[in-house]
Image (cartoon, helix red, strand yellow):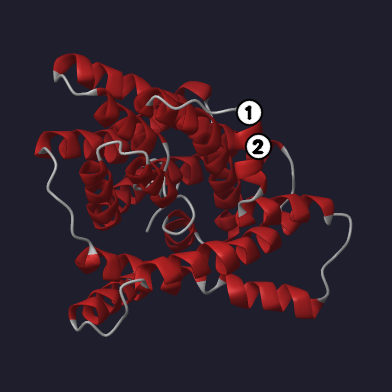
Amino acid sequence: MLFIGACLLLGMLLAHRRAVPENFTASLNALAIQVALPALVLRSLHALPLDGRVLLPFCMPWAVFIISAIAVRCAAALWPMDGPSRACLTLLCGTGNTSIIGIPLVATYLGADAIGLAVVADQSNFIVMCTLGMWSVAAGSGKRGSLRAMAQRMLHYPPQQAMLLALILRPWSFPDWLDQGLAALGALLTPIAVISVGAGLLQQRTDAPRSGLFVQGMVIKLLLVPACIFGLHGLLGSCGSPAFPVSVLQSAMPPMIVAGLIAVDQNLNPALAMRLLALGIPISFISTFGWSLLLGSAGGAGP
């Protein structure tokens, strides 16, 4: 956590001193998505035993999106909002930053052994974004999506390609040089991602949206959704499973960066989307710490 905090402050300092170009955060995000995350996915999933343990982390993002969609619809009934804002909240609350922020935080709280299950949740989260998420975008923007376009979007996403490659190569062991190389590239994810977030906090300039919508989004994404996932595990009697703390923590992550960029591109209340992205990450550092304490008291995990 000290390392993550130091990287966050370093990114803010670089942006404050204007020591970086305007496309600094975009370049770091591209490096994280195109290089570091695929390396981590390939190495982790290649060695992960494919048994019943992966079922709950895989199903968690689908439950998160459904819970979020219902919560946003209930909020819209109590506090009327326009269609684009409702679609923005549904997309950003229904998908999480389970890779750039989620994997490092899961490793911090639960240890390196939990990374494999966190990667499973992350890959499922992206599938949810490309399917249910894009359908919600289409509903809010008036544009229709096709199954072919969704499939192409998933196949062109580097971490998704790494996932498929890891499954294909499972019958063969990686040589030491490849395993060590993937480990070194995957280790870049945390510093690159968090420095980018820190710089983005000061580089971001958007018109302030209605504060009520922002508060609703944060409450739904960081409090209500993980509380429901926690409760679902209790109903299923799976609180003793290794997947329990991973699923709860991954469900408590801030909104997905890619989902926010899609909301901006489709003009789904861009100001709200950027504010949820920019402020959701530092707020989630506090909320996930609280969830880790609750998981510790429930016997799942501790910081």
Outermost front residue: 143
Q: Report the residue at 30% width, 54% height from top.
A: 289
Outermost right residue: 171
Identify whether 150 is placed above or below 10.
above
Q: Report the residue at 73% width, 40% height from top.
A: 51
Depth order, front residue of 12/263: 263
Which amino acid, mark 2? Ala
Q: Report the residue at 44% width, 71% height from top.
A: 27
Depth order, front residue of 235/147: 147
Instruction: Give the image location of residue 95, x and y in percent.
Output: 42, 39
Which residue position is annotated with label 1? 147
Instruction: Give the image location of residue 159, x and y in percent.
Output: 62, 55
Q: Are marks 1 and 2 in contact (CB under 8 Å)?
A: yes
Instruction: Give the image location of residue 169, x and y in percent.
Output: 83, 57
Q: Is residue 176 left or right of residue 7?
A: right
Identify whether 254 is placed above or below 89.
below
Q: Quadrant of residue 299?
A: top left
Q: What element does badge 2 sit on?
A: helix
Gap in Å between the C-alphas at discs 1 and 2? Answer: 6 Å
Which residue position is annotated with label 2? 151
Outermost top residue: 77
Q: What element does badge 1 sit on?
A: helix
Badge 2 density bin: few <14, some 14–19, many ≥20, Cα 10 Å: few
Badge 1 density bin: few <14, some 14–19, many ≥20, Cα 10 Å: few
